[in-house]
Amino acid sequence: MNPDRDKPSWLRAVTNATIVVVGSILVLFPSWLPRATPIGVDLENSAVELLQLALLLVSMALCLAASSHAGRFRPIYQTLSLGCLAAAIGESTDWLRLIIPFNPDLTLIPVFGMMIILLVNNPRETLRFVALSARHPASGFLAAALIIIYVFARFFGSKTFWQNTLEGDVPANLPKICSAYLELLACYFFFVGAVGFTFTLRRNREDL
């Protein structure tokens, strides 16, 4: 292992800082848009949903592209890409109902089935990846994204929480807005995690 490779470089620091700044701007960008136009289109909510979908699809593309360079971990990166696809389907069910004649949730069955097959058929690689990724910074972003979605988004997206907090009338859209922005932040964390695991392959396939 080349010790110089592990030393932080100014280019890597600038790249990481740029990703954080751009991501922060994207997360806050919809709040600058009008909530409704004269024709009744809610630009803010539409932008939040589109950004969520875009971040998840880009994360999926990164993991899928990285799988061809992942060596023994190729099935694991394919699984990660399928996980991002499943999340993207979950975020776009309202749109999918307009273009497919059946329940969009049914499309998740083959996706999850393929994920299970990949993991079951590659147990050694799965355990090795879990052990290595446990100490990788990108894992922290993925864990934070899951906590935001399944804990904070549901907590702050609850009307009961805001009724008890404000002790008065709650704006009708407040819980939904809070939940949507937290989900957008979670999607951004998914993207950062995907970037982190992807950049790792450029240094060493066996050392995440």
Image (tube, rainbow, N blue to C red):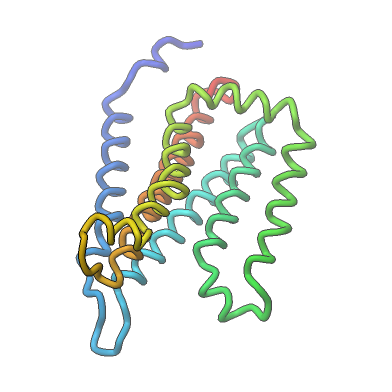
In front of the other: 168 or 131: 168
Which residue is drawn at the image coordinates 25% and 67% (left, top)?
170
Q: Position of residue 53 (x, y in %)?
A: 46, 61
Which residue is drawn at the image coordinates 47% and 39% (left, top)?
142
In front of the other: 182 or 61: 182
Which residue is drawn at the image coordinates 45% and 35% (left, top)?
196
* Residue 155 appears left or right of 127: left
In front of the other: 29 or 71: 29
Q: Position of residue 79 (x, y in %)?
A: 65, 43
The single residue placed furthest to the bottom in the displayed view is 39
Which residue is drawn at the image coordinates 32% and 82% (left, top)?
41
Q: Position of residue 39 (x, y in %)?
A: 29, 89
- The tally of labels here is 0
Residue 140 lies, with reference to residue 35, above or below; the image says above
Looking at the rendering, which quadrant does residue 168 occupy? bottom left
Looking at the rendering, which quadrant does residue 63 occupy? top right
